[in-house]
Image (tube, rainbow, N blue to C red):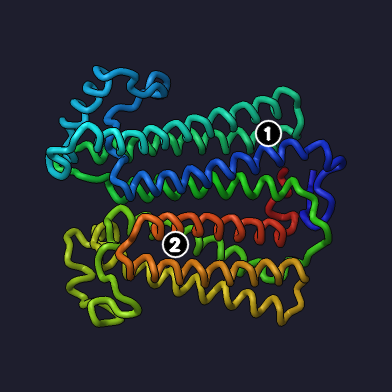
Amino acid sequence: MTIALNQPLIEAPSRHAGIRRWLWIVAALVFAMVVVGGATRLTGSGLSITEWKPITGALPPLSGAAWAEEFAKYRESPQYRLLNEGMSLGEFQFIYWWEWGHRQLGRFIGLVYLAGFLVVALRRLLPWRQTALLFGMGLLLGLQGAIGWIMVASGLQPGMVAVAPVKLTLHLTFAGLFFASVVAFAVWLTPPRRAEQARGLVGAWALLVLTFAQIALGGLVAGSKAGFTYNTWPLMDGALVPDGATLFAKSPFWENFVDNVALVQFNHRVGAYLLLALALWQAVSLRRAAAGAGAAKRATAIAGMTVMQAALGIVTLLLVVPLWAGLAHQALAFLLLAMVVVHLVRMQTGTAFAWL
């Protein structure tokens, strides 16, 4: 069956209103998870729970003895010994609750997605290919949880006081992939109000790719704490481009792209400039080409959000990453990602979804 996105997508749209609501609820929960995850990272709470117990770990310590046991486990971690030695039980409980809440929200998202998927599958509310796609998205969600524990485990290795930057980046990027897939499916199930031409489609795909790349670069910035250095703009240490020896000071060469704070921050800045230029270009080009009111308005909104995100990034840098600015910067990045996905799906012709 071939379905074009500029035609009615389903015979009876009302039949799928419940599925759309479920998907948007999942998307909202993932967005909240990203914000809570950012707070967990910025408060240094992510390594407070040193074990992964998918079932029994849902219960927090319920007695003084249980709290003492959890605190004893944390005191054996490298982060405590190298960074937080002398921490009180009350201080430990503060970071513990952040990580525990983060994990509980992850469990809740999994349950909400599983419950919705079972309803769709058992009641056969969608064709089997679309149901299979939802199943694959569920596997992606499960993989995201596994990556989360692998990330935490990397920070529990000898000599580590934080998680590995690459694994933090994978955790964030896979969250973005799942979030984008949920938003795309929900938008795809929503019949468009009017037909749209696929003009500017290449630019829309490029926006999506650059947005994902910038989110990944942001993960590296967070993981290597690159936002706490070179806290000036537009110059870095008095230059547009830091000294070459600084950019490639580490060996082996590839490691500079992961945890060399100078190169990581430089790449994130360049990525921001490229994304901003592309967003502005597409907004102007779609308006000039009269590509359709919907596409032009969405492109303009994306350009405006990108300007806001760039400004917020600069503020975050200049203020040396206060909690509120870091969270706002991460949250706006995912709102921008959602808007880019909506824009692309609405512009996309049936070719990319013909197999459905």
Q: Residue at x 25, y 34 (%)?
A: 90
Relative vertical location of residue 147 with respect to residue 325 in this rendering, above or below: above
Closer-to-camera residue (329/243): 329
Which sits earlier in the primary sequence, circle 1 or circle 2? 1
Q: CA distance from mark 1 to mark 2?
A: 31 Å
Q: Residue at x 83, y 54 (%)?
A: 7
What residue did someone put label 1 on?
131
The label shown at residue 214 is 2
Farthest residue to the right: give it.
11
Q: Is residue 256 left or right of residue 147?
A: left
Q: Residue 19 at what x, y percent from top left?
A: 72, 37
Amino acid tagged 1: Thr
Relative vertical location of residue 39 with respect to residue 126 in this rendering, above or below: below
Residue density around tag 2, few if under 14, some if 14–19, many if 20 or more, within 10 Å:
many
Disc count in the image? 2
Q: Are marks 1 and 2 in contact (CB under 8 Å)?
A: no
Q: Residue 123 at what x, y percent from top left?
A: 75, 24
- In which quadrant is the N terminus drawn? top right
The label shown at residue 48 is none
Closer-to-camera residue (243/221): 221
The image quarter containing residue 344 is: bottom right
Q: SS for tag 1?
A: helix
Q: SS for tag 2?
A: helix
Q: Is residue 348 left or right of residue 276?
A: right
The image quarter containing residue 267 is: bottom left
Q: Residue at x 37, y 65 (%)?
A: 316
Q: Residue 207 at what x, y percent from top left?
A: 56, 65
Closer-to-camera residue (228/114): 228
Amino acid tagged 2: Gln
